[in-house]
Image (cartoon, rainbow, N blue to C red):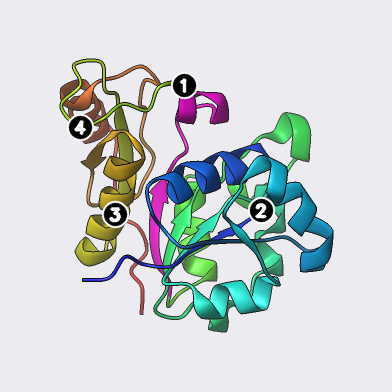
Amino acid sequence: MADPVIGILGAGRIGTALARLAVKAGYDVGVATAKPPAEIALLLEFTAPGARAETAADLVAGSDMVILALPLGKYRMLDPAAFAGKITVDAMNYWPQTEGNLPEFDSPLSSSEIIQAYLPQARVVRGFNHMGYHEFEQDARPAGDVGRRAMALAGNDDAANAVVAELVSRIGFDPVVAGICGPAVVSASARRSSVRVRMRRNLRPCLPAV
């Protein structure tokens, strides 16, 4: 089966780090922001060589997997209809210290449950959330390396989980699939076995895609 085309919304540190790793792993990668592609093309030449600059609308339409690497407060700028059926990786985190208070995220629901509710037909998978962007490249290791770290992901769609898990593996980490996307406490330095134990302690299902 052909590799999925990956679109990354956001050209900040997380977005460009993931773009570099995905390009290196052989994926076709596009990157978009709110700016015209011409304004970010030069940036990508230095921060993510090999990744294409696109408009956000074209990126979402032409990608099999869309990684949300935006400030969380901008999620309402997304067009829910455009994400219908798309594997959508929620790589966003809630940081009140930098984004201010977002009342909808001060609730018992996890942030990914709120994103799934806003994008009801998307196949949301939570991932790339529990490591710093600088760790993505410095800690990536080939399969079988004894120092290879685990990276957790969670979603209700088994097929979507499998596609994202393959990406995680190819960029240099052992994927640990929770299968659901509620809140979880995961150590950034954890290996596969300890991640599974900690995720089982505090997880609940996401709102289902319809």
Pointer 3 residue: 205
Q: Earlier in the sequence, mark 2 or mark 3?
A: 2
Q: Earlier in the sequence, mark 2 or mark 1?
A: 2
Q: Amino acid at mark 2?
A: Gly
Mark 2 or 3, closer to the camera: 2
Residue contact at pointers 1 and 3, CB within 8 angstroms: no
Mark 4 or 2, closer to the camera: 4
Query: x, y percentage for residue 22?
Result: 44, 49
Query: x, y percentage for residue 192?
Result: 20, 27
Q: Say what secondary structure mark 2 lies in.
A: loop
Q: Say what secondary structure mark 3 lies in.
A: loop
Q: Amino acid at mark 3?
A: Pro
In three-dimensional space, the C-alpha distance between marks 4 and 2, rounded to whole angstroms, equals 28 Å
Q: Is residue 102 visible?
A: no
Q: Nearer the viewer, residue 132 or 40?
A: 40
Pointer 1 residue: 138
In three-dimensional space, the C-alpha distance between marks 2 and 1, rounded to whole angstroms, equals 21 Å
Q: Which residues are magenta?
A: 122-137
In three-dimensional space, the C-alpha distance between marks 4 and 3, rounded to whole angstroms, equals 30 Å
Mark 4 or 3, closer to the camera: 4
Query: x, y percentage for residue 47?
Result: 67, 41
Q: Is residue 12 left or right of residue 122?
A: right
